[in-house]
Image: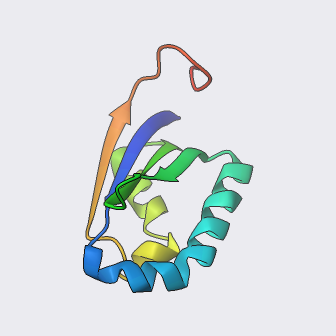
Amino acid sequence: MAVFLVEYTYPPEKLPLRDEHRPAHRAWLSEQVDAGRMLIAGPLTDGSGGLFLVRGDDADSTREFVAADPFQQVGGVSAVRVQEWTPVFGPFTA
């Protein structure tokens, strides 16, 4: 499997919605980390989005995978960017 960088953009007006669904979002992320599919996840410090490293077969299946995230299910994400990434050094190299 390849590694994909997934970047979310959060619409500022949806902050209350994300606050409401954050426990479900984090539970989903934790389940994906435990399953080995999600390598790392976290929000950007300015609140404008989130960044994930995900194992996947291709960009399309990775988009489908993250579409199950509760934040996406409730419309808390305005844009999703998926880009294949090649780790060369560090813990995510194969």
Quadrant of residue 84 within the rendered picture: top left
Give left or right: position of 9 versus 43: left
Q: Residue at x 67, y 50 (%)?
A: 33
The residue lying at 33 percent from left, 71 percent from top is 77
Screen quadrant of the C terminus = top right
**Does residue 38 appear to the left or right of 87 in the view shown?**
right
How many marks the image carries: the answer is 0
Q: Position of residue 57 (x, y in %)?
A: 47, 42
| 39, 51: nearer the viewer | 51
Q: Quadrant of residue 71?
A: bottom left
Query: At which x and y percent is residue 82?
Result: 32, 48
- Residue 10, given in percent of the width and then of the height, sits at 31, 67
Residue in the picture at 47% in, 14% down: 88
30 relative to 75, above or below: above
Judged left or right of residue 37, residue 12 is left
In the image: residue 31, left or right of residue 2: right
User: In the displayed image of the protein, which residue is found farthest to the right?
Assistant: 34
> Outermost residue toward the top?
89
Does 35 appear above or below 85?
below
The residue shown at (31%, 60%) is: 48
Display colour scheme: rainbow
Q: Position of residue 27 (x, y in %)?
A: 67, 68
